[in-house]
Image: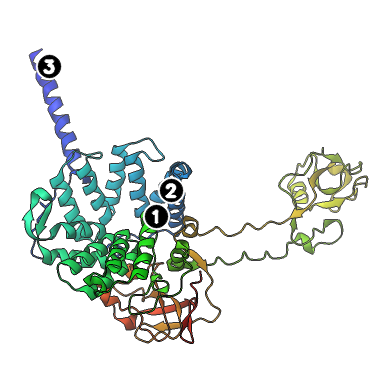
Amino acid sequence: MHYRLEFILLLVVVVFTQLNCTMNTLPRNMSLKAFDPHRPDFECKHEADYVPPIDPEAEQWLQQGLALTSQLLWPDQRDYKKAVELWTKAAERKHWKAMLDLANAYAHGEGVLRDTEHAVQIVEAAMTLGIPSAYDLMGIYHMEGLGVIQDASRAFAFWELAADMGSPSAMAYLGKKLDATYDSPRDGFWGNREVALKMLECSFAQGNAQGAFQLGVTLDITDHDYPRALRVFHEGVKFGSAESAAYLGGSLREGEPLAGGMADVSRGDRYSALADALRRDPDLRLPNLDKVLPLPPADLPKWDGNKQTLIDAAKPVVPVPPPPPKPAPSAASQRTGRAHIPDGYVLPDKPQQSVPAQYETASAPATGYWLARLLHPRTERHAQWDAAQVPLHYKEGELFDRTRPGLQYEDGRILFHYLGEPVLLVIPPPMPNPRVVQGIAREAALPDRAVQCPGNRRCPTTGIWQASVPEDLATAAVFNQWHRQTYVEKGQSFPDPRESYLDIRPSQVTWLWWDQANEIRHGEVTHIST
């Protein structure tokens, strides 16, 4: 009995040790370097350079899920259950953004039963793919104790690792925490401004809204670099930063140094209107902001006072879907006599009425197309004859054709099966762009006259321009985004990527003209058009 007890205790120790080893190998429990708020330097990396390529169909599922859960919908209108189904399919294709959205759905019980363990497992799967934002989210889970033991030290360690890997949101958060002149761990900040600025600049370069806001604040309040702060805040509004829009709205109305010491109520009111819209819809992006709200000293375009006009004009545009292709003439339309079916028509999947099969000696009890079939096909030749038959049209009361090309009478009896009357071929319209459904983009047709311009030239014609760089460029992944657009007037310079902390020369950028809404003619600005 004594030896049996020792054996049981030994078995428990072995099992516990194995379990502990297994737990320690999970990404949530990975060995981490301690958070160092006084690190001497920071190397900027872009998340887009390290994430796996995104499957186009999975991207559609992600966007459809986002449209179903848009903050613009009333809570009872949001369909998180369907969104979870879509994100699950996208996550199975290793769409990393869908994986993180799916994890948060499980973490908070949106569309599914709350399951924080499953949420953590999904984040861990994304971590194994090397997704920087997955490490950032794991830090949040550790800070909040979601599915893991609450541990602020590990949270900050995960955030620092995520920032080093290229997560713009982790950079924005830590950049704010380190942007001080002295340490106060109790209050959650430290004095390491040199690293803080590098993190914020790198976050800003990736189009992160929070990074833009925090960078603008420190440039304004600490550096008093008002021209740059104004541009950064303005870009932040384009990125979807409600804080940047509200900050500019108040500064311009009050005539603060950021605004050059002169009150500009009209501009301030427009920024404030956009701040309200961005608070309601965090997914909104406004890359064409200069179309409706250019920076001073440019004149403001006329505005009808409708807030939605501002939003729609500043949204990114996406191509109008092409019309569905016309189907090629059907084989049935080339036939003659009873076998002819007019082009553009097809037989229905199910007849409009249920009519019993008829022997060849009968007459058609209903008008429509009938298909001949052997009652008892026994040989390969019989099967070939059946396969060669085409639907034939008979009017009610007409006798069926009793001739049998290719068959003898001893081959058995023939039945005619009713298929119904032809119906108009309906071509489904193209799927609507999920971003348009979500309200974060609007459709626009590319002009018939294609205009491209290198970024080191002056803008040849007023309008919205889409930017891109060659795919083999090191920074192509972070630059070539669907919303990389801007509104430029004729004769102006195109935006310089280097102002956004991107190592791209203007000459490497190609700008594609989209349209020329709001073109200035004879010194007058037309009303904002959308």
Question: Where is residue 114 shown, x and y percent of the image?
Answer: 34, 36
Mark 2 or 1: in front is 1
Circle 1: residue type:
Asp
Left or right? Give the position of 482 relative to 24.
Answer: right
Q: Secondary structure at mark 3?
A: helix
Q: Secondary structure at mark 1?
A: loop
Residue 95 visible, this angle: no
Which mark is on residue 69? 2
Check the picture and name the quadrant holding the N terminus.
top left
**Quarter of image, res 51:** bottom left
Q: Which numbered disc flags the more N-terminal residue, 2 or 3? A: 3
- Residue 265 location in percent, x, y? 34, 69
The residues bearing labels 2 and 3 have C-alpha atoms spaced at a distance of: 59 Å
Point 31% across, 69% down: residue: 234
The residue beneath circle 1 is: 281
Q: Is residue 290 left or right of residue 369?
A: left
N-term mark: 1 or 3: 3
Q: Up-down: is 32 above or below 228? A: above
How far apart marks 2 and 1 lie (CA) works out to: 11 Å
